[in-house]
Amino acid sequence: MFFTKSVLAAGGLATLSQAHMLLRTPAPYTSPALQSGPIDASGSNFPCQAQPGASFVGTPTPMAKGSKQQMAFTGSAVHGGGSCQVSITYDNPPTKASKWKVIHSIQGGCPARNTAGNLPADPNLQGSDSYEFPIPSDIPSGNATIAWTWLNKIGNREFYMNCAPVAIEGEGGSESALAGLPDMLVANIGNGCTTAEGVDVKFPNPGSSVETNVDEGSLGAPQGSCGGGAAPARRARRASFSA
């Protein structure tokens, strides 16, 4: 069960003074406090920036199965872009043991396309790019959590994660369809999987919905014990790349 809350916690308000990236759409949880920094290198606040015993508070965004949804951000420290995934879990609340299933992957150019470094410093900037992602028509209905995860291209090797409560709506759907989606790639938080600085990550198993914003030859695979996802990648729908 999700709860509503009209005012952000003081910690969440404090993060708005920073220029790092925050998930804006879909509406993120108000608790755990929204954090623009990466997940701790030890993984202690994985998933969703949550501390042990944290309560998840927020108003779910309705999302119809088979629909296209928008993802957008606030902030300007885009670190030359990188690669992102949109994943879902039905665990309530999400925990370290939750299975996150990928519904969309963005290889390069996320959370900003065609940006070599950072955007002009502005913690309230809403001018960075937005992205479209699908809600699969065959996943179960019900309350869930959507995660945006980001492996930055430039800077320290980090793993960013913000989460949003959603309500998946529509008939049908099955647990087997959900289980057939790839696992979310997790790296750079002491789990034996790392990424290279200056390289956009090529996901081992991006799933069937993929946006690739750079020359595929410039992408680089993660290193170490990263896993390949829960299912073989199906034929992907890829965005056109233009220099």
Image (cartoon, rainbow, N blue to C red):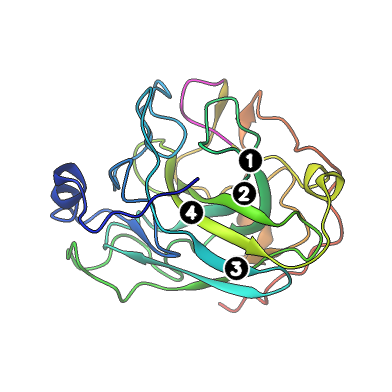
Q: Which mark sits nearer the N-terminus, 2 or 1?
A: 2
- At label 2, counting other C-alpha atoms closer than 10 Å, the crowd grade (few under 14, some 14-19, many 20 or more) is many
Residue 173 screen position, x and y as percent: 82, 57
Q: Nearer the viewer, mark 1 or mark 3?
A: 3
- Examine the structure image and report whether residue 46 is included in the region drawn in magenta: no
Q: Which residue is mark 3?
A: 63
Q: Which residue is mark 2?
A: 88
Q: Which mark sits nearer the N-terminus, 1 or 3?
A: 3
Q: CA distance from mark 4 to mark 3?
A: 10 Å
| Tag shown at residue 25 | none
Q: CA distance from mark 4 to mark 1?
A: 14 Å
Mark 2 near mark 1, Cβ–Cβ under 8 Å? Answer: yes
Q: Which residue is mark 4?
A: 165
Which residue: 34% across, 43% down? 155
The residue type indicated by label 4 comes to: Pro
Q: Secondary structure at mark 1?
A: loop
Q: Is residue 196 left or right of residue 75?
A: right
Which residue: 71% across, 51% down? 206
- The answer to which quarter of the image holds residue 106 is bottom right
Q: CA distance from mark 2 to mark 1?
A: 5 Å
Quadrant position of the C terminus in the picture: bottom right
Q: Nearer the viewer, mark 3 or mark 2?
A: 3
Which residue: 73% across, 68% down? 170
- At label 4, counting other C-alpha atoms closer than 10 Å, the crowd grade (few under 14, some 14-19, many 20 or more) is many
Q: Which residue is mark 1?
A: 100
